[in-house]
Amino acid sequence: MILEQFVFKVLEVPFVDRGRDWDGLDCWGLIRLAYLEIYDIELPSYVDQYDDSCDRETIRKIIELEKDVLWHEVDQPIPGDVALLRILGHALHTGLMVDTRRALHTEINVGPMIEELSSLMWRNRVEGYYRHDALI
């Protein structure tokens, strides 16, 4: 599957806390499914390491410990990179870059959407952009 096909298909998938498949996804589930479908890369699930999306402290710790294990921070994102985004001041949210400016992500009560990361809502919340080791 190519990125454009994945985006088109995933826009119909509801947000499900700790969701990891086409039946429902949370933000990491979306990244995980994208990497499996597009790049044939199986990322860790982490689903057994936190209770739900409200478990922010645990999620923050997982991200902090894992973000540099298989990922390299990059200055300029390309499609397929991961945007790490701050929520309430902490890097807790992820989005899949669909081009150099916009990310696909999913949120509770909203579901998947594509947003411009230079928008007023997101421009000060981008923690960084990360590229998987296998894609460098």
Image (spheres, helix red, strand yellow):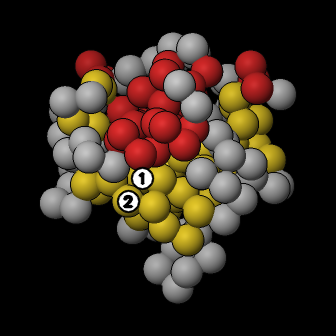
State which mark lies toward you, 2 or 1: 2
Task: Say which of 74 and 88 sits in front.
Answer: 74
Q: Is residue 57 visible?
A: no
Relative to 114, residue 4 above or below: above
The label on residue 113 is: 2
Relative to 89, residue 81 above or below: above
Whole-percent x, y for residue 31 in the image: 47, 35
Whole-percent x, y for residue 122 in the image: 52, 73
* Residue under the point 49% across and 22% down: 37
Task: Say which of 92 and 132 sits in front.
Answer: 132
Going by the numbered disc 2, the residue's amino acid type is Met
Q: Is residue 72 visible?
A: yes
Whole-percent x, y for residue 76 in the image: 81, 56
Q: Quadrant of the C terminus?
A: top right
Query: Which type of secondary structure does the marked residue at label 2 adopt?
Result: strand
Q: Residues within 10 Å of mark 2 (few under 14, many from 20)?
A: some
Q: Is residue 117 left or right of residue 12?
A: right
Q: Are marks 2 and 1 in contact (CB under 8 Å)?
A: yes
Q: Is residue 40 left or right of residue 74?
A: left
Closer to the N terminus: mark 2 or mark 1? 1
Going by the numbered disc 1, the residue's amino acid type is His
* Residue under the point 22% across and 61% down: 110
Whole-percent x, y for residue 34 in the image: 48, 31
Q: Is residue 55 left or right of residue 97?
A: left
> Which residue is the site of mark 1?
105
